[in-house]
Image (spheres, rainbow, N blue to C red):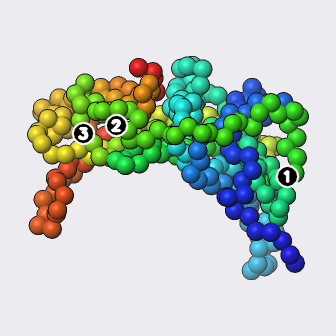
Amino acid sequence: MSYKLTGGWLVQKQLAYVEETTYGTTPTNPTFTHAGPIVDITDSQETQAIKYRQIGSRDMYAMIKTGEVYSFDVTFNPLTDDLINYAINLPGVGTKNISKSLSFIKSALINNTEMYTIYKGCVADSIDISISADSAVEITVSYICKDITTPSTSHGLGTVGSFGVNPTLIPWTNLSGGSSPFLWNAVSVDTPSWSCSVTNNIERVKVNGDINVKFTEPTLRDITFEFDTLHKDATLIADQKGSGATWNARAMIYKLSVDRRLSFTDAFLESLEMADATGDTTPKTESYTGTAKSVVCEPY
């Protein structure tokens, strides 16, 4: 048997998305928006089944299919905040929020033939944003899907207005937010490493008679963050400890670009790690983890 190998280098139409009007249905004649410079995309497809047995046999009698479950993770370097907003905003907040489902599309050469894959009914279960010195801003979103189509030579969407324009701009980096991008309690804090995670705890809801999920419902939102800073005083240590039963809730801001920032309300420093060691040749740092009440990505 002779065939051509494939790989990420043979992607033809890069990952792009469109907002759905009806959950799990890709609009006909859509115009897609490019998802940004993609670092990695990983699909997960599971067939749910019952291992059916009958008495009188040591071996399984049958595998009975009961459903299909789909998800995918995508890591990218952002050029805009659109996909961030779809992942972090509460329902009703802005025009792009967690109540809106998306369809994604990509194509690749498989055995030298261009084939399309469509990800339908995509809702962000979680988003991780990380920024380190000398690196690009890196975002990973985990999507829960209603369906991921089998690769096909036809996308079946009618006339596509655009598959998204491949980016030529440089993505956001650790320098994009300018000098002193990190503010804690309105005071600049130097950090070589900062990250945050928003988890929507999506609940997959299936009903009898449907092979796919009928609803992907966002439930409780969890917001966590981590950062390192150089050890120079006791200001953050005091915030982490609080005073007796009083624990300090602070505003926290991280500037992602020249005009977009993440703004956190009621951020709490939960844990601190720092160490002195005889073998250290680097300056002492304070490493914090924390939780925030809310977050928005906003212009400034």
Q: Residues within 10 Å of mark 2 (few under 14, many from 20)?
A: many
Q: CA distance from mark 3 to mark 2?
A: 19 Å
Residue 148 in percent (x, y) is at: 75, 48
Residue at 16% in and 57% down: 275
Residue 123's image quarter?
A: top right
Q: Is residue 284 left or right of residue 23?
A: left
Q: Residue at x 44, y 24 (%)?
A: 259
* Residue where numbered disc 1 is placed: 152
Give the vertical position of 78 relative to 12 (above or below): above
Residue 190, numbered circle: 3
What percent of the width, then of the height, locates residue 182?
A: 30, 33
- Res 104 quadrant in image: top right
* Residue occupying the point 56% across, 51% down: 39
What type is the residue that disc 2 sits on? Thr
Q: Which mark is residue 291?
A: 2
C-alpha separation, residue under disc 3 versus residue under disc 1? 50 Å
Q: CA distance from mark 1 to mark 2?
A: 44 Å
